[in-house]
Amino acid sequence: MNLAVATSSEHRSTTLLSVAEGNKASSMLDGVFTVRRSQSTLLITLAVVAGLLFMSQFPALSPVASNNPNEATGEAPPVTDSDGDFIPDVHENLFEDWVNQTTADGRNIVIPGLDRDDARDAKYDLDRDGLNATEEYCWPYPANCTQPGFPRGLTGLLDEDGERMYLDPRVSDTDGDGLPDGFEAWLCLQTGGFNAVDLVFRCPKFDPLNASEGDEDPDEDGFDVDRNGIIDENERYTSAEEYRHGMPPFHVDELDGLWCSASLPDGGPFDNWPYISTAANMTFANLLAACTTNSTATFDDDLWLGTNPLNGDSDHRAWNGVSLGRTFPSFGDGLPDGWEVHFGLDPLNRSNALMDVDSDGWDEDRDGFVTGDPVTTQTGVSLGEALSSYEEYLVYNDDGNVVRSGLKHVAFGEDDAWVEVPVRLASPTANVATLHHDVRDLHVNGQDVYVLMRHGITHWSVDEDTSTDTWWPHATRLTDMLPLNVDGTLAGFAVTSNDGLQIISLLEDGGLAPMETWSHLDGPALEKAVMLDLDGSSLHVLALGSNGEGGVWTLGSDLQPNGEVLGDLSPGLEASLSSTNATVTSLAHAPGVDGVPTLFVGTDRGLVVFETASARDANLNGTWLFHFAFESTVIERNLDPLRPIGANVGDEPAAVRDLVLDGAGPDQLDTLWMAMPSGLHRLDLRTLTVSHGGDLVHPGKDGRSIVGADDVHSIHVLDDAILVGSAWGLWVVDGGRDATYGNREQALLPGELVTLATVEVDGALRILGGAAPGRFANQALMSPVSNDSDFDGMTDGWELIHGLDPTDPWDAFLDPDGDGLDKDLDGFADDRLWSNLDEYRYIAITTEGYDSTDPSNPDTDMDGASDGAEVHAFHLSTTTLWCHYDFQMNYQCDSDVGAAANLTYVDNAPTDASTDPTNPDSDGDGMPDGWEIKHRRWVGTTFDGGNNWTLDPMRPDDALWDADRDGLANICEYQWGVMRGLAVGGELVDTHGESPEAAQLWVEADPNNADSDGDTMTDGWEAGGLCTYDATRVGVNPLNASDGLENPDGDGFDVNLDGNLTAGEAYVNWLEFHLKDLDIVDGAVTFGPYTVPEGLDLSLLQGMLLGDEPAHGFIDDADLATLASAVPTAVGSTDPLDTDSDDDGMPDGWEIHFARWDVLEDRWTLNPIDRTDRFLDADADGMTNWEEYNAIDPALNELSSIQS
């Protein structure tokens, strides 16, 4: 605080609130402060005046050695020190006046001036700044400057006018910069300001006679609150603010002392900040005595109580669970002081970095507890569920990308301020705005600016000062925009995305054509596209993504696709990219020098070059000019051609962010500019050599390099300049490919500029730049004291843990996982969104569910039904309304009835009940909701919305229904589907011998198809009525269509008695099942409507043809007990896993082979499903069938392996 110096010779104030200083002053002045009576005052005044009148009549006398001028020695006049305190009288006279002030809280400040007749004042520190009067006089020399023989010049310093300045012993802060003199002197010593040779302080940073330092921020720990990339003056955390941090209101150093804590006579245990040492060689011995006694929040003694203006992270104490204790050395908590102070956190307590002050963490595992972050590292904070202050700071900092994202523009030149184009959701009435802040690409065509963003394109008509937005479905992520020129005129764009390629035509006014006219070309996720330089009227678009995925699409002059992908990509191109898991980041296709077209593919791993015109060559080898990957790949690491990036290479030091061809004309290209993490690089197309450095490096500012200026992301070439978009912002290289002339002065355009363009506005060139959001947009300020920093209705921790952006106020309205409703079946679930905010607000409707769905997963509970569909009870795209059951449970599929059903479902929606998107089985019947919805069919003749369903996700009793009457209830059909998943996953190799490869050929269980695998054997019979695949039933499987010729029980009859059961002798599954259908017609074995499968030999059945032609099949003679145990859809079939299905002591195969028709008895002599036939005597030889089977030599009867 600057204090005015009192000039009156009268000292009438009688109030001193500082008792210690009052005692000093009282002793020094010998009772000056007693109240004077008016009469005494009058008498003394008259006496003084009279004495002056008398003395003025005599000349002044001064003792001299000689009054002869010829004998003068030329010595300076002697310095007068009346009181012998080594402070000259002339200096004490400068500061003899008293200071009288009243503080803001009404306290009086009375500080006596120096007294040339009192030697005691030299040792007093009446202004409580930590320096006594001698120290203040000596500055910039140490306190012993008054000792005889000390080598020094004049004390004090000269100001800019040549006047000598001194520290004022009556004012704590002589220069008025908010920093007390002693504090600044101590900091000067700490920063090496004392020259031990010359015995003088030279303070480049903290000089108690330099008034500008209090407003400076030497440790650069201010906070860019408005996130514009610049720490403005009002955003600095100045040295004065650091000194006064934590200071109570109305604290005045002159009264209350320095803002430090002392435990006299002892000093601090360390010499480093914040401790004030009292070692024997300590320079400033009076600091501790000047410390305040008014602080009640100290945890330790002999230390400064504010933050450290020389260290951006001052924390020096920590909470051990019981009390605060010191941490030494003072190594901070990872949070800059200015950031903590702005949000009201404690920049001295490192423990609060891991606290979740605003309680905005999220209980991800729903165990009822939000686990804390264990340690202040990137990995550490990812382990906890809390959103600690440190993690919130990391969100704000975003790896250094703190500038608000979005479209910005500035004039080409040095004298301008940039303009930030608003986002439409934030400024709905603005003439010009972008639909989103995440700008991916820019293209300018005259006065038309096209801005590609993550979710759509904004067309900005500059001359009309209007803009129009075109949104894509929210789940589509746009990546690149390639202009399509026809006959030299812009006709449209090819837009790459995670959904493939979209071809968009332009209208006559420059606007985008309606979405229904676009061409959607399916493909893999694509990142970048380039026009191949091929002859002809067709346009050939090469688009690539990750790991060699992509294609070449051919378009006509009308921008309509000419067929599908025009040929596969060259195997060599695919192999070059996939061999190193590269993701394409930039593309350029040059006509080539000497007529050889060259494709340059920039990736996150480096630059690979191909000599190709079409990118479809059968034999194509790529050359990696440079490459880097942390993991081992077949491509060698090589960063030699690039500018060294230093020790901190980052994750992708060889990433090629942008490629721009340059030359004297389109057919005279000789240069390829490359945007790299290590700077701007130039590639000579003739020699493929890379150059960098010199004028291609940002020169820095004020002798210091600028962080991020050479981390280049985009390039735009002008006739006489190269615009460079870096992580720091825009800068310009003067000149071009022929010659460069250093850095051109250019107004700042801040942010990580990933794309650049220029447009002429009112005759002046303006530079457009898209500032990337990094991981976080910073549209709103991330706050550790607000649980919803962007005020979008979703808590920060929930957003962060689900991959959303807690600094983006508008992501609440988006539906990035695409789990809304697709009512028109156009493939986009955008007819009714299930937005991020909807997902956050969801309240579970079942006890097994939980609140909030997952905005990054369209099917939170993984039950096969999307979240939005479950909540809104609309399942048009996942329910088969085209097929139904009539009232007799006959399955029918009718296009007319189905079309009417679909129309009714849409018009009357919702006709379903909502299910719980956080509970995979809302009704708890063991079948997931989505599976039930997929396989349900309505019952009736017409659909009116109130029909019964064969499956209902909100009716648990449907688990035991069996609409297809195949012997497997719905729950069993679902569980067989689970078994298939286990088999595909390799879980049945050891137990069942089923390989994953074979299981891939199994079909899905279908509760509306009695024979899911189509092998003519019903599911229930093949499953044996079981809900799971028992290991004892391997060989017969309702999902495996190839098991018809299997013979798991090994039955049959060795017809030729060679000891082997050949194909024609086996009683295979297909025969066992279709025994119920067997008949002999016209001397041939038939099976009703079923055709004998290819490869099935009926030799086993040939014996039946030796007798008379039967009148009916085996099923008509079956005993009721055997039929009763059969699966309903397989009554009359034998058991494929039992060699003796009817338990009559005679094997099925033996009975089948020797079965004959008995005309007289009108029945079969042997029947594998009739246990009573064992008592028959088919050949009337006096022995029953059972006796004959058991009396005949087994060797002539059957194989030993199946003997009964």
Image (cartoon, rainbow, N blue to C red):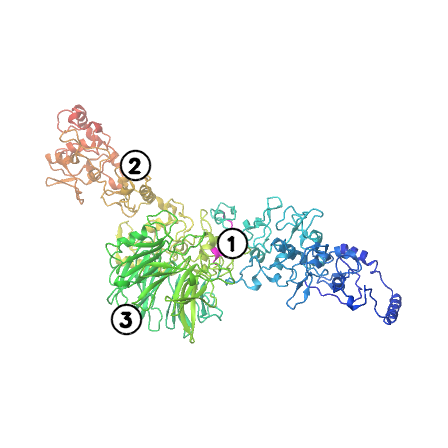
The outermost residue toward the bottom is: 763
Q: Report the magenta residues as a range.
A: 384-401
| Residue 1107 seen in the figure | no
Q: Quadrant of residue 617?
A: bottom left
Residue 661 - label:
none
Disc 2 vs disc 1: Cβ atoms closer than 8 Å?
no
* C-alpha gap between disc 2 and disc 3: 66 Å
Q: Secondary structure at mark 1?
A: helix
Residue 392 - label:
1
Q: Is residue 64 left or right of residue 656?
A: right
Can you give x and y, in whole percent of width and height, for residue 516 in the image? 32, 65
Number of numbered tags placed on the structure image: 3
| Residue picked out by circle 3 | 487
| Residue picked out by circle 2 | 992
Placement of the N terminus among the 4 image quadrants: bottom right
Q: Tell me the mark number nearer the camera, choosing from 2 and 1.
A: 1
